[in-house]
Image (cartoon, rainbow, N blue to C red):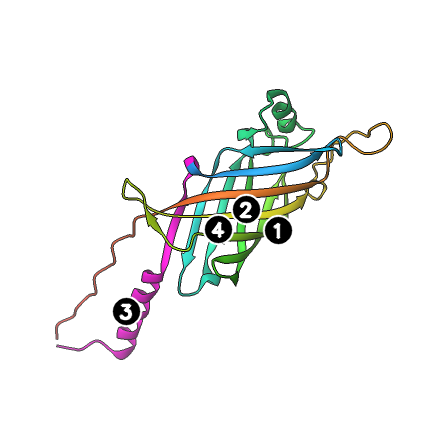
Amino acid sequence: MRHPTLSAVLGLILATASSAYAATWQIDPAHSSVQFAVRHLMVSTVRGTFNTVSGTVTTDDADPTQSSVEATIDVNSIDTREPKRDSHLKSPDFLDAATYPTITFKSTKVAKVGENKFAVTGNLTLHGVTKEVVLEVEGSPRELKDPSGNIKLGGSAHTKINRQDFGVTWNKGLDGGGVVVGDDIEITIDIELVKKAATAAAGANQENG
């Protein structure tokens, strides 16, 4: 019987260690949302949410910088508690949901900046324009099992964008100065993740001499 070579043994060990540390999670849309805030008439702040968000997060406990995020937001799920305003925001004046029905984010870099805190750099595509943004992310310190037996993680992320950078330019001037809608958009993302079931590891082949 031939014994496995040293390189084969090391390869198996590394593959096993990698699978033990890496995990893939799905965004739970029932417990996740994207909130935004923008100045209105220069005197108040209007807040709203996108109620439908989906995507995948891959975490690597051994090396968090190898983690990644991909997320998609349904523009038509916008909700500011005022139907007429929601319709205007979905119109070509603003997000143009008929032409650009989704907002997407795909990470390109993850840096650990503190205990359970990360700076996640990625490409945000909104209104057909892609720009690099940085999310300030704080995650739950450990995974938990919910009453149904699902393994969960959670976290929140914050960033600020200028809507003009994404071609969302509609506005109206006010008598005496100022405009109807501010340019800076504060974004807060609350995410709950559910771990995907691990695939069965392939058995090692044995060769008899």
**Residue shown at the point (49%, 43%) measured from the top left:** 190
Task: Judge whether 168 appears above or below 66 on screen.
Answer: above
Query: Which amino acid type is shown beneath numbered disc 1?
Result: Val
Estimate how packed mark 2 is, as few (under 14), some (14 to 19) or many (20 or more) residues with alpha carbons within 10 Å.
Answer: many
In the rendered view, tell whether residue 120 sits above or below residue 209.
above
Dot 4: what SS?
strand
Quadrant for residue 173, please give it. top right
As measured in the structure, the alpha-carbon distance from the residue carrying label 2 to the one carrying label 1 is 9 Å
The residue shown at (27%, 73%) is 8
Q: Is residue 194 above or below residue 38?
A: below
Residue that numbered label 1 is attached to: 133
Q: Main secondary structure of the magenta part?
A: helix
Residue tagged 3 = 12
On the image, the x and y values in percent for residue 131 come to 64, 49
Q: Write down the region rendered in magenta.
A: 1-30
Residue type at tag 2 = Phe
Are the residues flagged by discs 2 and 4 in contact, CB closer than 8 Å?
yes
Give the residue at mark 2.
Answer: 105
